[in-house]
Image (spheres, rainbow, N blue to C red):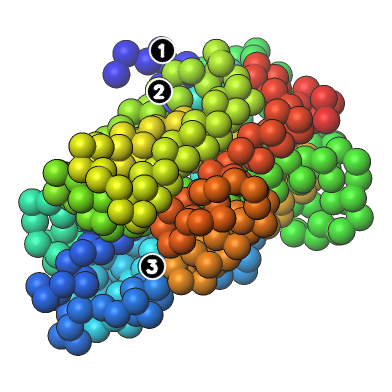
Amino acid sequence: MGWPTYVRNQYMASIAVNILSIAFGGTMGWMSSSYLELQSAATPLATGPLNKHELGWVTCSPALGALLVTVFLTSFADKYGRKRFLLCLSLPVLLSWLIISLARHPWHLCLARFLAGSAGGGSFTVIPLYITEIAENRLRSTLGTFLGLGTMLGFLLINVLSYYFSFAAVARVMCALPLLFVACFLRNPETPQFLVMHNAAKAQAALSYYRGIDSNAKPDVEVQQELNRLCEPPALEAREAAKSSRVSCAEFLQPKARKAFLIGSLMVLINQLSGLLPLQNYISSIFSQAGSGLSARVSTIIVCFIQLLGTYATTHFVENAGRKTLLICSTAGICLGELALSAYYYLTAQGYDTSSCSWVPIAALSFVVFTASGGAMSIIYVVMAEICPPRIRSMAVRIHISCIFILGMTILKVNIASNLYLYLGNFILQTFPLASAAFGIAGTIFAFAVFSFVLTILVIIFVPETKGKTIEEIQASL
């Protein structure tokens, strides 16, 4: 692929492990691509079209599975290794698509998406740790964005497949992803940081592999120096603590750890309170209600493609522009796009003729997902893994990912979330005419825009720039 030998294995391993993120992106995009079909007379379910209650549970089931795995099972990655844990995640992904291909009842879909969500929770918790541990400092951010890129690719893939193939056929095609993941990822060794606690020789071999050096030749000086840093007592103690999962509350209360944890919590809020998850899951519905000239499926594919471009652009700009700059641009862009989308729905609901502006929902939502994919949906996972001290990193990431899925599950219960965000939006900006008069989707999206604005200010004030810094330098700057 044209990569230099000394980085090729890092890129290939990052691509291989993120086949799981493609599968999870497909899971999330499946709801958007199947939303209208499941509520129509053409539904493949024997029980008929889904009602709103059933649709809400099918939509939020992945969050339940992700929460369960993140809280109770991801500690296995610290005890038995990142590689083994990630390989095990391929099984629930495979089972989820098999169940969807045979589904005849809403609870079949809930079960399938629960399994898929469990794999997604494990992936979003452990993949950032895996990338952080195999990557050189100068590649860490670029490779870290592959998680968001894979998710967006899966989102686009499922919508394209759904445009051409039937409900069951799409699920059968998606079964190939977990099998492809196992075939590609199996050859990669465990991370050097994990192996150094068990077998120094294997750790050196793994580090040589990821640095593109023949482990049978004379040890490379830089590899030996990096291995020596991994074997230093403070680093070993931190990883041993993570392995045993015996991290006390007092360690989270240390000044640097507390600040890092709070910044990670801000990343959680950026991911959820900006409204990206419900907008993604209901893209088809949004375009249908907007009366766009394009079909809902075509509009969704266009938006997903733009989202993929935004994420791909991030992989090139993240080291040059910096994490903080991209996050500021991302949250500010989300705010502007949501304001435009909310205004369109508000004017339409008030009876104004908006037929000449039917392109606004597509343009606004495209702008939102493009800017979101350039920061709020990709950079946050890099920042989470970078800023946390090694001693609490694994536990802190698990807590943050759990919070993401708890909030996601709550927000995706559409009726509750809509009212909640509307009231909060009116409370925050009572004097703004749109907030005081808008109801339904216009008010909900406006509230998302308000939160995006607040989050932009918080990023400017609190998030440090980590561009070009080692993990040690990042910790020293907190």
Q: Percent x, y for residue 252?
A: 85, 51
Could you tell me which secondary element the residue under label 3 belongs to? helix
Where does the image place residue 254, in percent across and percent down from the top left? 91, 45
Q: Where is residue 417? Give x, y as percent.
A: 52, 66
Q: Residue furthest bottom?
A: 47
Mark sitting on residue 4? 1
- Closer to the chain start, of discs 1 and 2, is 1
The answer to whether 409 is drawn above or below residue 444 in the figure is below
Using the rendered image of the protein, determine whether residue 428 is visible from the camera's viewpoint. yes
Q: State the residue position of label 3.
A: 59
Labelled disc at residue 264? none
Quarter of the view holding residue 199: top right
Label 1 Cα neighbours within 10 Å, binned few <14 / some 14-19 / many ≥20: few
Which three-letter amino acid code belongs to the residue tagged 3? Thr
Is 323 or 169 nearer to us in this picture?
A: 323
Kindly state the secondary structure of the residue where label 1 is placed. Answer: loop
Of the residues under marks 1 and 3, which one precedes in the sequence?
A: 1
Q: Marks 1 and 3: which is nearer the front?
A: 3
Residue under pointer 2: 313
Q: Relative to 233, is 427 on the left or the right?
A: left
Q: Mark 3: few, some, or many residues within 10 Å (few <14, many ≥20)? A: many
Return the disc, 2 or 3, that comes first in the chain's sequence.
Answer: 3
* Observer-nearest of 237 and 107: 107
Q: CA distance from mark 2 to mark 3?
A: 29 Å
Q: Residue at x 40, y 23 (%)?
A: 313
Q: Amino acid at mark 2?
A: Ala
Q: Check contact, mark 1 vs mark 3: CB within 8 A.
A: no
